[in-house]
Image: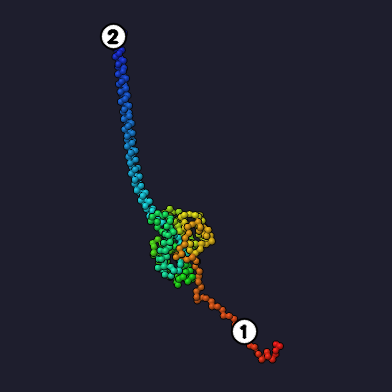
Amino acid sequence: MSGLAEFEARLAKLQAIEDDKTALVQDLIQQVKTLESRLTITEKRLKQKRDLADMYDQRHIEKDGELGAVKQSLAQMNYVLVLVDGDCMPFVSSLLTPGEQGGRKASRLLKARVLEHLGDKKLPPNTKVVIRVYANLSGLSKAYRDAGLLHTVADFGAFVNGFNKEDALCDFVNAGDGKECADEKIKAAFQMAIDNVQCRHVILGGSADNGYARLLGPHRGSAKVALIEGPPFAKELVELASHFGAFDCQDVFSKTKLTVAQPLGTITPPRSPPPVTVRTVNFAAVASNPAA
């Protein structure tokens, strides 16, 4: 090969190498552009995700605040419900006779005994005690009068008035004059309280009425339920009572059922003994006839 041809061949090789270098640089530049484009897109997406995360963080903080407010509000709504069947849980005479003042004292004492019972239940702070006494007021007032515990029907109205005025959460409610009116209202209120998470405890006072056995049966052993004993537990409640936290309020409720006293004006006096027939003996005739 002549010298010129050799140089031309070498030049061609160098040009090929330069072309490869140029192509390599161009490929590298294109790759960098592609990577920069991807990086820009990735950074944009990352920024969007950061913004979204910041938004969710802010919402989380706001929701935490709202949840705290709701919890605080719910805590203010916790309560204990006391249901008393006034028709079968007679109040002691020492509370009935003072009228309105006796009703006020009955409300205070009943609430105090309930709080004593709840002392070890670890209830949330600010738990309220709501007391509802249901009764046929017309019939019950006459029963108290006929039992000699009150002089007039109006005296019981004064007692109820005092009970209702003593505490805004203590009510003596007229359930109506039907035989089962008080029972039905108590059963409905009991079931509603059992299903309500804000109601922490339900206390039932109706110890002399067998009808509450069917209400209590499904909740046997429930720590949410307790019973107040006034008169001795009725036959069907005796066994059930052992499965609940039972307690009595002897200074509020009588341990005996109401018994109707016979008015003095209707007492039948004892019958006079039959007259004794006195025979008159003729002693002279006896003497003249000794064989008689």
Question: Which residue is found at the position 49% from the left and 70% from the top?
Answer: 147
**Circle number at residue 223:** none
Is residue 135 placed above or below 74 in the rendered structure? below
- Please state which of residues 138 and 104 is positioned toward the viewer in this rendering: 104
**Picture quadrant of residue 120:** bottom left
Is residue 143 placed above or below 41 in the rendered structure? below
**Circle number at residue 277:** 1
**Picture quadrant of residue 41:** top left
Q: Amino acid at mark 1?
A: Thr
Residue extending farthest to the right is 291
In the image, is 261 to the left or to the right of 9?
Answer: right
SS of the residue under disc 1: loop
Q: Position of residue 279 (x, y in %)?
A: 63, 86
Question: Which residue is found at the position 62% from the left and 85% from the top?
Answer: 278
Q: Which residue is mark 2?
A: 3
From mark 1 to mark 2, how far is it between C-alphas? 187 Å
The answer to whether residue 20 shows anywhere in this view is: yes
Reading the chain from its start, which is encountered first: label 1 or label 2? 2
Is residue 102 placed above or below 70 in the rendered structure? below
Nearest to viewer (mark 1 / mark 2) = 1
Residue extending farthest to the top is 2
Q: Amino acid at mark 2?
A: Gly
Q: How many marks?
A: 2
- Please state which of residues 276 and 121 is positioned toward the viewer in this rendering: 121
- Quadrant location of the N terminus in the rendered image: top left
SS of the residue under disc 2: helix
